[in-house]
Image (tube, rainbow, N blue to C red):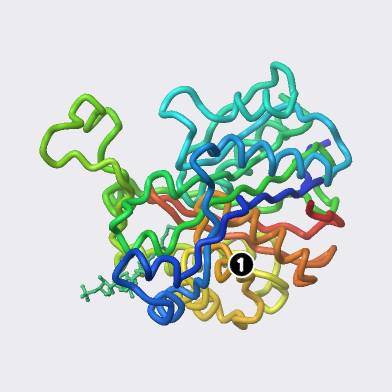
Amino acid sequence: MTRAAVISGLGSWLPPRIVTNDDLARELDTDDAWIRSRTGIGQRHTADDRTATSDLAVEAGRRALKSAGRESADCVVVATTTPDRPCPATAPLVATGLNLGTVPAFDVAAVCTGFLYGLGVAGGLIAAGTVDSVLVVGAEKFSSILDPQDRSTRAIFGDGAGAVLLTAGDPDAPGALGPLDLASDGTGSDLITVPSGGSREPFTARTGPGYDPYFRMVGKTVFRSAVERMAASALDVAHRAGWSVDEVDLLVPHQANLRIMHAVADRMKLPRERCAVHLDRVGNTAAAAVPLALADAVERGRLRPGDRVVMTAFGGGITWGACAVRWPDVTPI
Ligand code: UT7
């Protein structure tokens, strides 16, 4: 019998410190009205100096396990743009932090699409019978790579973590991962990038001209591409699930920018009210955005057991994707 990966637990965690738009306006040439009208963001959470991405991931992972009523998982996948260190991966630290023993643990680097890529590889490991459960975490201390002087990125990005526990189950069970679309286009690798600190521009060139350790984004080009890619990918998985757009109860897009999310819904001919919005309170949390938005939607009664959900994301690489799922009876913690 075919084994499917079924969502059995959902956890979320935000570092307590909140940075409002007014807080940013005291430091940078920006204001609340610009940020709200251009992005839909009102505030974001920022981790303190002692907290790393793995700390956020452990907290979200612990909550996802608790939500599933379990104490263990057979594998940990961490999707992140901001690993604790360039080497090694963050996932083994997360597995150890959760007392999971010597389970396989690895990172997925697909920037804001990372959580969907994580679902894809985790679903494959379960379907192949390699493991029976996988904790998939999207976690970011995105503030750690932002240029303190760059108002366009400081206004958008925030820190946080979200996680799901996937367990082996029946393909028809509520929560079974349905059709999945994953894609990339490396010709766009300069659009969303940290230019230095990798093998192309190593740390050893730190003092050289052009060394840039901060996150950079070509906002306008990314905007257009994000709308086209997310809408097409979301429609593709809905179609493959056998759902008309009218039958999609909730679209959970990557929380990039409210204007992008509304444009995706418009392009799909989906009423904007059926688009989950969480970024007003947390900003764009990159790989953590989709699971955080899922948890928020359940907590606010926007997502109920049996609902037809389409998740979609777009990010650096460039990468994009979508996944359809019938929502299970899972309560986020
Ligand atoms: O998560 C990965 C995917 N990311 C995204 O999908 C983000 C996609 N892009 C965006 O969300 C938008 O492009 C931004 C929010 C980044 C920018 O909005 P925009 O409407 O595309 O503005 P823009 O980049 O064309 O900038 C317009 C002006 C510029 O000033 P000048 O050059 O016209 O004088 C910017 O410097 O707005 C300025 N600006 C700001 N002004 C006040 C940029 N950021 C700010 C700010 N406050 N925070």
Residue 76 vs residue 198: left or right? right
Residue 189 in view, yes or no: yes
Q: Position of residue 275 (x, y in %)?
A: 62, 73
Task: Identify residue for label 1.
Answer: 278
Instruction: Give neighbour class at mark 1: few <14, some 14-19, many 20+ (Cα, 10 Å).
Output: many
- Between residue 30 and residue 74, name the one nearer to us: 30
Which residue does the image show at 61% across and 42% down from the upper left? 56
Which residue does the image show at 47% across and 64% down from the upper left? 256
Residue type at the position of mark 1: His
Q: Position of residue 59 (x, y in %)?
A: 69, 41
Q: Position of residue 110 (x, y in %)?
A: 46, 44
- Between residue 225 and residue 275, name the one nearer to us: 275
Q: Quadrant of residue 5?
A: top right
Which residue does the image show at 64% across and 65% down from the upper left? 238
210 up-or-down from 328: above or below: above
Residue 1 vs residue 144: left or right? right
78 up-or-down from 219: above or below: above
Q: Quadrant of residue 330?
A: bottom right
* View extreme (front): residue: 26
Q: Position of residue 40 (x, y in %)?
A: 49, 75
If the picture is divided into quarters, which one holds ligand 1? bottom left
The residue tagged with tag 1: helix, strand or loop? loop
Quarter of the rendering occupied by the N terminus: top right
189 up-or-down from 326: above or below: above
Q: Quadrant of residue 224?
A: bottom left
